[in-house]
Amino acid sequence: IGFRGRLVAVAAMVRCFTIVMPRSPRRPLLASFVIATVAAAVALAVVPSTVAFIGIRPPPRRLSAEASMGAIEDEVGAEIGDAERMDAPNASSSGQGDVLDDWAQVNFPGVRPDLVPGAPVQDPSFVDEEALRKERTFPIPEEGLVQLAKAFLAKLFVDPTEAKRRMSSDFRFIAPVVPALGDGISGEELCKALGQFNILEAVPDINAQQYDFRTDPFEPNRVWFTARGRGTNTGPVFGGLPATGKSYEAPPQSQSLTFNERGEITKMTIGYVMDKTVGTTGGLGGIFGILYGIGYGLPIPEAQPWKPSPIYKLLSQTGALVSNLQKLAR
C-alpha cells in the first residue's frame, strides 16, 4: 500500500477510534487521537488486511504516469463496453422499431393504422423473383427483350410486313377466342388480317396505351405487358362501312410476346381482359373490343359482351351455385 493509501486508511482508523472510545477526563481528546494514530500505523504496517477488515478498499499500487493513464483508459473502456453491451439489445430493438416506423410512414400515408403491416410481408405463396431469375436464365437480358418487343409492336399496325420480319417461322398468334380451330394463327395469316381491317384507316388517332413491360421469372424469354387503348372512328371500317364518330376505351388487357434465342418472336398473345368493368367495349378485348366500341360489333357471341347461359343464370339465382355445380358434377 502506498503512502497515500496508508494515509487514507489511518484517517479512517482514527475516525473509528474517536467514535468508539468514550471521552473522559482521564483520556482527553488529544491523547485519544495519539493512541488511535499509533494503533492504526501499527495495524497497517504489520497486518495489511486490517484495511480490508475495517471496510476500506486500498487504492492500487502507484504506477508511472503513462502506465497509470493506460490503466485508467483500459478500466474506463471496459466499463463503457459493458454498458454498451447491456444497452445493445435495447438499442437494436429501438433502432429496428424506428426503421419500421419510417417504413410505415413512407409506404402507408393516410392508411388506417390497424391495416398497416408490422413489417414487410413474407409468405411462401409469394415467389422469390430474384432467386427464380438467377435459377432460370435466358441469353438475351430483360432490357434487350423489352426493346425487341417494343420494336415489333411499333410496326405491327403501321407496317405489318416489317413486323412479320421479326416473327419466327413457327410464329403463332393466340387470343381468348382466336383461333376457332388449331393452335394459333400463323404470321402470314395475322399480317393478312391486319391489312384487311386496316385499323389505322378506321381509327387514325388510335393509341394502344401499352405499358408495364417485364419478363416472366418463370419464362425468362417471355415479355408481358399491359395494354388498354383508345381512339375515335373517323374513317371507313373494312374499307367501305361509314365512320360512326364513336370513341372507344378498352379495358386493361394482359398481353405477351415470346422470343427464341435469335430474338425472333415465336408467340403473341393478346386480349386477355383483366377487368371487364373498365372501358366502353362491353368487357371485350382485342379487335372485337374495338369494333364493338365504335359501333360495329360482329354478330357472333364471341364478339359480343359476355352473357350468362340460361342454365348458369338459373343455378346462380338459387343462391347455391357451388352446391348445385357439385351436384351436376356427380
Image (spheres, rainbow, N blue to C red):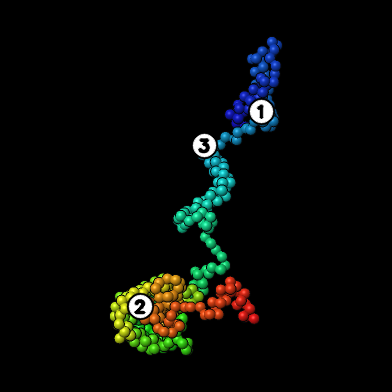
Q: CA distance from mark 2 to mark 3?
A: 97 Å
Image coordinates of residue 220 in percent, x first then y, are 47, 76
User: Is residue 182 positioned above or below 257 on the image?
Assistant: below
- From the viewer's perspective, is the residue at label 2 or at label 3 nearer? 2
Image coordinates of residue 118 in percent, x first then y, are 54, 56
The amino acid type of the residue labelled 2 equals Ile
Q: Counting other residues with Cα less than 10 Å from the Cα at mark 1, is it few (<14), some (14-19), or many (20 or more)?
A: some
Between 189 and 55, the residue placed more toward the observer is: 189
Label drawn at residue 44 = 1
Locate the C terminus by quadrant: bottom right
Q: Counting other residues with Cα less than 10 Å from the Cα at mark 2, is it few (<14), some (14-19), or many (20 or more)?
A: many
The image quadrant of residue 157 is bottom left
Residue at 52% in and 60% down: 120
User: Is residue 18 positioned above or below 181 on the image?
Assistant: above
Q: Are marks 2 and 1 in contact (CB under 8 Å)?
A: no
Between 174 and 124, the residue placed more toward the observer is: 174
User: Can the viewer see residue 224?
Assistant: no
- Residue identified by numbered label 3: 65
Q: Counting other residues with Cα less than 10 Å from the Cα at mark 3, is it few (<14), some (14-19), or many (20 or more)?
A: few
- From the viewer's perspective, is the residue at label 2 or at label 1 nearer? 2
Image coordinates of residue 327 in percent, x first then y, are 63, 78
Q: CA distance from mark 2 to mark 1?
A: 112 Å
User: Is residue 281 positioned above or below 36 on the image?
Assistant: below
Label drawn at residue 294 = 2
User: Can the viewer see residue 209?
Assistant: yes
Locate the N terminus by quadrant: top right
Q: SS at mark 1?
A: helix
Image coordinates of residue 67 in percent, x first then y, are 54, 40
Q: SS at mark 3?
A: helix
Q: Is residue 90 left or right of residue 276?
A: right
Residue at 44% in and 75% down: 283
Q: CA distance from mark 3 to mark 1?
A: 26 Å
